[in-house]
Image (cartoon, grey):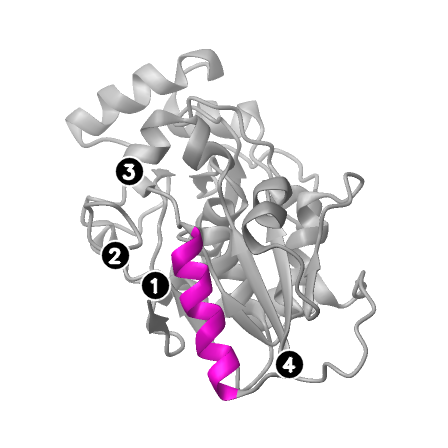
Amino acid sequence: MQSLPPMKLDMPLNIVDIFGGLGNQLFQYSFGRYIQVKTGIPTKFAFSQHKSTIYREPLILQLLDDIPVANAQDTNRIMRIGKRYILENIMKKLMHGESAFTEKREYEENYSSGNFYVGYWQHDKYVVPIIPEMRTKIFASRHKQYNIKNSQNRKVAIHVRRGDYIENQTANDFHGVCEIDYFERAIAYFNNISREFFFLIFSDDPGWCKEEFGFRENYYFFDDRNRSTIDDFVDMAMCDHFIVSNSTFSWWAAILSSHEDKILIRPKKWFRFAPDPPIFNLHPWIEI
């Protein structure tokens, strides 16, 4: 985490709020970098967590160590309120069209300074400029945690997200969950190409995965309790091909993979009822 002194009161500044899981955090960070390049105005990042009913650890700070974090003085300067009242006052300001911007507003024409940006910002255009830099930062000092022989260009990451999609009714109602049939059909797609693919399974529910997938010679389960979420993310992104869940966590791993001929498979329905976010144009995706 980069510690910067408070901005002078007469200096322009924008703040982007970061919340949710790692995938959402990476989109928010990309958006902040995007508007900074667009405007030349310094951007800092806040970690208010006000949008989430479940506390989510700011994992992005473990992944990227040079994020300029807004302090209380920065936030107060933008919002003109104390930190403890940030949720209530953001809503009031949004209603009156002041200071805070959500992604539903016409932010493209309002790149002025002094704004607190609240949203998920899931759009290809924010991601494109930052991919090379993020690949360098994330992978430069990291190495694969596994040892797979004779699997050159044949490593397929399978991400099975269950966890909150099962346990949290609101998340389940909005996202739904990918069932075993989806993964079996995606695996069959690869097996129809070659029987030499090696499948690496990443999941927040390894017990369910072992029960559903069973023992297969060319499968590897990441189920070490000592592994961190960051370990899973980096190792997943080092794979060659991807079968993702309807999760931005594995979407980011797939996009950050540098394998030129990667095959990306995703569920046809990203959300239960909402339309897909505009994040599937950076690379061809196969929908199953």
Vertical relation: 69 (above or below) 195: above
The residue wearing badge 2 is: 276
What's the amino acid at mark 3?
Phe
Q: Which residue corresponds to the image point at 45% horizontal and 42% vertical from the top-left?
A: 13
The answer to whether the residues at label 1 and label 2 have Cβ atoms under 8 Å apart is yes
Q: Quadrant of residue 37?
A: bottom left
Regarding mark 2 in the picture, which secondary structure is present there? Answer: loop
Tell me how far mark 4 sits from mark 1, CA to CA.
Answer: 25 Å
- Magenta residues: mostly which secondary structure? helix
Tell me how far mark 1 sits from mark 2, CA to CA.
Answer: 8 Å
Magenta span of residues: 180-193
Would you say residue 187 sits in the magenta stretch?
Answer: yes
The residue wearing badge 1 is: 279
The residue wearing badge 4 is: 154
Give the percent coordinates (x, y) of residue 270: 31, 54
Give the percent coordinates (x, y) of residue 154: 64, 81
